[in-house]
Amino acid sequence: MINKQTDRREFLKEIGIYAGSTAFLASIPWMKAFSQENGKNRAPSDRVRLAVIGVGSRGHALLLNLLEIENVAVVAVCDNYEPHYNRAIETTKGTAQAFYNHRKLLNEIKDLDAVVIATPLHEHAHITIDCLNAGLHVFCEKSMARTIQDSKSMVDTSHATGKILQIGQQRLFNPVYLDALERIRAGEIGQITQVRAFWHRNNDWRRPIPSPDLERKINWRLYKEYSGGLMTELASHQIQVANWFIDEIPTQVRGSGSICYWKDGREVYDQVALVYDYPNGAKCIYDSLISNKHYGLEEQIMGDKGTIEPELNRIYSENPPVSPGIKQLIHNLKSEVFEVIPIGGATWLPEVASFNNGNRIAQYDNNDTFLELAGFVKAVKAGKPYPNLLREGYHATIASLLGLQAMETNSIVNWPAEYVMGKES
Amino acid sequence: MKDITITASRLRKELIIFFICFVAAFGLNIYAIAKFETDWSEMLGQLHVVLAIAAAIYLIIALFRFIFIAFIRLNKKK
């Protein structure tokens, strides 16, 4: 079992030298790369020179994390929205050159190693492809692109140029998920037959706009031209987890979406419900809505021997250990004293949810966004991508977009063979 | 405010009463292990529960003792 440390540097070292099972490590080859020191004493010339393109809400968060990674120099930032542009200059204390246009950045900044892209979704593809063709490694936020074809073009360009393309799916680096995966591969919860995932919020998903003409620019997530809404912005994370844990990609998907609450001119659904079918008969049942937050978010990984809820960091056995005798005695006494006498007698008692509190999966104090960026920097230093990491991000994006297509066409959509990326050995 | 003195004999008396409560609770634990056929390691493993039960029994007895003594003293005053 991975022994988690709260110190990030120690964690990165430890998981790199973890001698887990071959099958487990084969699932996460990207973790082997952390076996080297983080390069505290490396020469300045060994620094990874990065640019960040898109420094809005998510981009700014990535920038703050990058500034904490040793031997990383953020030498340029880029955003075409003035307030974000100015904030990025302030955050980097003027050490990074600022641009409004990514092509100007690529032309003027020399000796760049990589870029981090966190623009609105519809911009991901062309900026990523430009950067890969310019000889740079790319970290691109999820989802990969607005369309399936654009996603494939990004992958094809990465393969053709030999440059790293890593997609921002941070759960792939999260210690709780990694520990959960290890337990699954060890058979602790048995055969997974269903993943039930959901993401519920209660807000209109809008950002404040200084003037009405900036509505589509700032609230791009609400418009089909720029975003797939709940599917590309939220579902993508959780379907990636389902694919990863089931160790398959779906064969088909069906679903239904609607704008049932936030009828404010938006074009994307404010509620989605889908079923993904996997080759072995397993299913991922997914829903997301933004009009109730009672249940929050979770991926419920259900096997015949147990259940894992990684967002809550809990694992539950189908057959939890029996309570100590004295506690059973107290419970029975309490039941007898406070027993409700049924009128007419019950012939059937409802099978309510288990009250088993389960066990914690892993100690986790880290920031998985930091871990995924640190992983990207490691890959850039090594000059080669992690096997099968891009595959996870790519398939998550394709699954989300196919789900959207299923809802929009009100049909069962099969996964096209040409959009399957094979596993690297 | 008056000083309260706990004499050695009073302390010994209360400890004996608590010990009796502990023995009763420990006996209850053994009974529960036998009845529900759980592991005998719970004799020590559930000591914290036994102590909690012993404390609860002690407090219930203390309550009755208090009521009894209060009743006696009220009658004496009459």
Image (spheres, grey):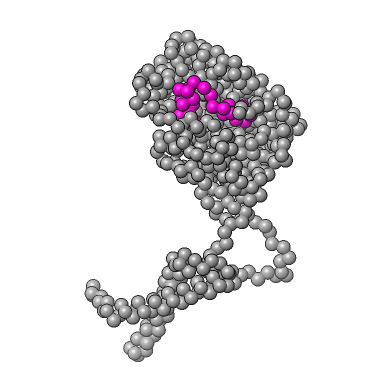
Q: Give the range drawn in magenta.
A: A372-397
Residue A376 lies in the magenta stretch: yes
The quadrant of the picture occupied by the C terminus of chain A is top right
Whether residue B8 is situated above or below residue A359 in the rendered picture: below
Q: Residue at x 48, y 12 (%)?
A: A106
Q: Quadrant of residue A267?
A: top right
Q: Is residue B22 left or right of residue A353?
A: left
Residue A124 lies in the magenta stretch: no
Q: What x and y, as percent, mark residue A67? A: 40, 26
Question: Which residue is at the far top?
Answer: A107
Q: Which residue is drawn at 46% across and 25% down?
A: A377
Whether residue A186 is situated above or below residue A130 in the rendered picture: below
How would you classify the magenta stretch by its main secondary structure?
helix
Question: Which residue is at the far right?
Answer: A411
Taking the image as drawn, is residue A229 in sight? no
Whether residue A195 is situated above or below residue B19 in the rendered picture: above
Which is more toward the observer, A191 or A259? A191
Q: What x and y, as percent, mark residue A39? A: 39, 27
Taking the image as drawn, is residue B48 in sight? yes
